[in-house]
Amino acid sequence: MPIAALSDRRRVVGWYAAFAVFAMVVIVTCGLQVQWTWGIWAAGGYVLAAVTAGLWRSRGREAALAIALAGALAAPLAWQVTFGARISKAGEGSLAVVARSAVLLLHQGTPYLQADQISHPWDYNPYEPAMAIFGLPAALGLHGAAGNPRLWMAITAAAILAAAFRMARPCSALRSTAFAFGSPVLALPLTTGLTDVPVLALLCLTLTCTSAYTSRRAQLAGAIALGAACAIKATAWPALPIIAVMLAARDGVRSATRFAVAAAITMIALVMATAPAAAAAPAALFQNLVLFPLGMTRYQTGAHSPLPGHLLALIGPAGRWAAIGLLCAASLAIVVSLVIRPPADTRAAAWRLALTLGLLFAVAPATRWGYFVYPAALLGFVSMISSERGPWAAGLAPPRHLPGQPAARGMPLPAEIVHDASEVVLDGSALNGVSGIRRVKDGPPSVII
């Protein structure tokens, strides 16, 4: 067996073994039944996937993907549908909030309840208005699994993530998407009903579209993806200044301004489309989106993991204000870091975003461990892209010539094979197979090999 293939097989076995260890930790440390159930199914699936990848040389990698998806995603969801409480009956949880917000949107033109209509913490809707889109199938009459917002979140996220991998790893987009959904980073949130997976997929697509070798059209697509993410959940907001600063440092202020304006227009358009009546009642929007996450409403949020910000908030009003002050100080420090040392490329922007979100989640007054899926997903995505061999190993996109556009800063000239010697202008300094330069009208020169 070639050394490279053996190394790949060992790496796959190592990843699934690490996933199995994580699933076992979930079994031991988590008290919620849905998390405990996921851990049992996932641990067995990951162990079997690791064994399969290690022993089956020819098709072990593909079989391990299928086993991991079955054990970590399909089996726990099927168990919930068969034996667990369904969302329509339970009436609680994040998915129930999304389903109710869609009903409110259809009947009242806004997914938010007024203060005098709220009598329970689950009556609040801490999500941006566009999150209600995933509840529309149920609000329009679909029942059972077909109307569950989780199904439409998973389908949307899979399509978006596949598009991101298609741009970044065209030869293995399907395999990469399957691996991502079979990993704990996406399988656990989907199984437990968290609403972050579509936002994560949109952020990954944004990172891919804003890499160094993409066109202006691709960057526009990235801005639209980020605007949509910001209209779904506020956890995507820090990505806008970080990526805009990265673009300003790499491509210039005009490129960054164009990106930021397109993202802002997309977000505003989606918010207006999914909460047209919110303008007439901004108090309800402010109460749901700002006061409730900060713990400043009559009924408190259920996000209470023992992180520094929440521990401070437990002290009382003074501690809560101290936690809010700490959150503001952390935000200011992040802004200062962007001014002093802006990220130079997409990889640096992904790392900066992961660190930023991790810091904000740690000091927020109301927070939970599940939010750290954002740093994990962003760094995992960058790691998967960077592991590609060949020209992809150094970045998030393949170097390629874009007709009619100048080469990006630091971009190597595209190599071409030219058979007509009349097209070649020899430069007199052939080196490493480069024999000359082809002059192309209305475009950059190309290296001739």
Image (spheres, rainbow, N blue to C red):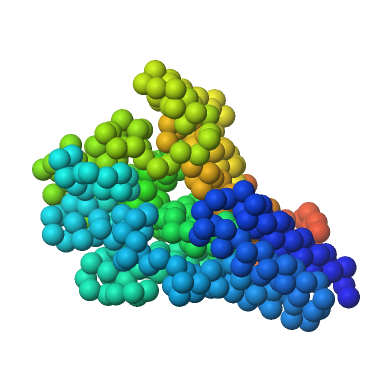
- Percent x, y for residue 348? 59, 42
Residue 97 lies in quadrant: bottom left
Residue at x-position 45% and y-position 75%: 82
Query: Can I make out residue 391 in this image?
Result: no
Residue at x-position 34% and y-position 61%: 90
- Percent x, y for residue 129? 27, 51
Residue at x-position 40% and y-position 42%: 302
65 shown above or below 105: below
Q: Camera-side residue: 334 or 22?
A: 22
- Percent x, y for residue 330? 48, 26
Q: Camera-side residue: 281 or 142?
A: 142
Residue at x-position 34% and y-position 74%: 144
Quick one: quadrant of the C terminus? bottom right
- Percent x, y for residue 329? 46, 22
Residue 159 lies in quadrant: bottom left
**Farthest residue toward the top?**
318
Query: Can I make out residue 139 in this image?
Result: yes
Residue 348 located left or right of residue 286: right
Residue 134 lies in quadrant: bottom left
Q: Camera-side residue: 7 or 151?
A: 151
Residue 436 located left or right of residue 306: right
298 shown above or below 188: above
